[in-house]
Image (cartoon, rainbow, N blue to C red):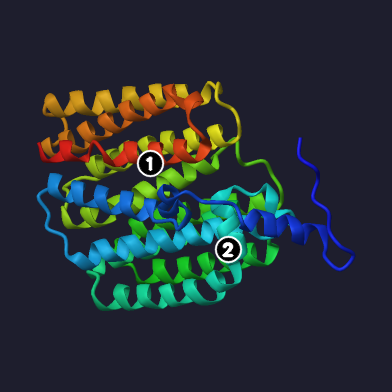
């Protein structure tokens, strides 16, 4: 056993622990994860694969906008997780970085990135994609308020207020029929109710776990451009495609969270993977039978490949560290994407 850290009378004990956490060695292969670069890469590659499957040609700005937006959300998510943390030594390697640089990120980097996103949104992004992205941004704000900003009441109130005001403005300006506006209003209202209930410490995790909420938002972001530009005749296929990706991403996130929590034999991950396998199989069979459009075959193949690789990673969970497990689980999402081009 190692001797406990000691501090002089002029140095608080938590400051010593904070310094010890900041000096942890980070292997080179983990830096993309620490800098939150893995999520933008996964999002952009899936967006490009879906565009190819639907025969759509995306402008470079759509990929750049998705990458930057995804990076900002992950930086906010991980930085907000560290607010209120007194003992930095208990943080994992990625949260140590955001705890150390939280002031620079929240007051400098994130606002600058938001300005760039605003210029891209109103200057170069197609209007139809813009409205969908704004609606998704409101849901992301509620997600950050409900799950990531739990340690800061002020940040929770800021995100919920921004989402509520933004939702009212968005709904009033959306070029949709009144019925669609009503449905969207109910959806936003329901999301805000969930967020407010969480602020009142109601246990909403059983209703909508954080991993599932994050996976759904991530899938909606990956499919935003193709959902608009492919101009589907019905909403069935875009919804199924989004659910397909959401289930795959949920498997990834739940596996990682359970592994990091030390629950390596938790039965929830295999059950979710089995349910995802059944859903993917149903989508592929419906596509082969002609019930769904042929374009659904390609993301279905890639999702199936990703799920199988996640199964391989999960099977070897006892042989790798939490950091390596996370990296391998993320790689499993993108390695099968060449199947879309076959």
Mark 1 vs 2, N-terminal side = 2
Q: Secondary structure at mark 2?
A: helix
Query: In this image, 110 relative to 238: left or right?
Result: right
Mark 1 or 2: in front is 1
Label at residue 270: none
Query: Residue 38, percent across and down?
Result: 38, 51
Residue 341 in percent (x, y) is at: 11, 41
Q: Is residue 85 visible?
A: no
Relative to residue 119, is residue 268 depicted above or below?
Answer: above
The image quadrant of residue 58 is bottom left
For image coordinates 17% across by 51% down, the residue present is 51
Label 1 neighbour load within 10 Å: few <14, some 14-19, many 20+: many
User: Measuring 56% from the left and 65% from the top, which residue is drawn there?
Assistant: 159
Q: Is residue 342 depicted above or below 94 in this figure?
A: above
Q: Which residue lies at the image location 39% right of the left edge and 37% below the top edge?
A: 328
> How far is mark 1 from mark 2, CA to CA?
30 Å
Residue 337 quadrant: top left
- Determine the residue located farthest toward the front in the rendered image: 2
Residue at position x 39%, y 56% in the image = 37
Q: Are marks 1 and 2 in contact (CB under 8 Å)?
A: no
Residue indicated by mark 1? 330
Q: How many numbered markers are drawn?
A: 2
Task: Quadrant for the C terminus, please.
Answer: top left
Q: Nearer the viewer, residue 247 or 181?
A: 247
Query: Can you say whether 62 is above or below 55 in the image?
Result: below
* Residue designated by label 2: 160
Secondary structure, mark 1, is helix
Picture coordinates of residue 230, whole percent (x, y): 16, 53
Residue 205 appears in view: yes
């Amino acid at each position: 056993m190692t001797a406990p850290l000691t501090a002089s009378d002029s140095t608080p004990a938590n400051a010593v622990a904070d310094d010890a956490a900041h000096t942890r060695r980070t292997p080179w292969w983990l830096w993309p994860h620490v800098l939150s670069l893995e999520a933008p890469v996964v999002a952009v590659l899936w967006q490009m694969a879906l565009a190819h499957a639907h025969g759509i040609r995306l402008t470079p700005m759509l990929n750049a906008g998705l990458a930057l937006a995804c990076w900002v959300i992950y930086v906010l998510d991980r930085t907000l997780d560290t607010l209120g943390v007194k003992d930095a030594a208990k943080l994992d390697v990625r949260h140590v970085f955001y705890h150390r640089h939280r002031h620079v990120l929240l007051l400098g980097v994130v606002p600058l990135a938001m300005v760039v996103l605003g210029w891209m949104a109103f200057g170069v992004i197609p209007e139809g994609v813009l409205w969908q992205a704004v609606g998704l941004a409101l849901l992301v704000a509620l997600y950050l308020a409900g799950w990531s900003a739990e340690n800061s009441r002020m940040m929770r109130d800021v995100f919920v207020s921004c989402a509520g005001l933004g939702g009212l403005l968005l709904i009033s300006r959306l070029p949709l029929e009144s019925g669609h506006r009503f449905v969207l209003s109910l959806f936003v209202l329901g999301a805000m109710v969930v967020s407010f209930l969480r602020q009142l410490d109601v246990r909403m995790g059983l209703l909508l776990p954080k991993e599932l909420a994050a996976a759904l938002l991530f899938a909606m972001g990956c499919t935003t451009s193709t959902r608009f530009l492919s101009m589907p005749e019905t909403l069935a296929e875009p919804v199924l495609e989004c659910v397909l990706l959401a289930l795959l991403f949920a498997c990834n996130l739940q596996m990682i969270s359970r592994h990091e929590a030390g629950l390596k034999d938790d039965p929830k991950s295999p059950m979710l993977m089995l349910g995802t396998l059944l859903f993917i199989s149903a989508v592929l069979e419906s596509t082969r039978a002609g019930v769904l459009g042929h374009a659904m075959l390609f993301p279905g193949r890639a999702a199936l490949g990703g799920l199988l690789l996640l199964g391989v990673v999960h099977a070897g969970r006892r042989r790798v560290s939490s950091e390596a497990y996370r990296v391998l689980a993320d790689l499993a999402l993108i390695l099968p994407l060449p199947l879309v081009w076959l």
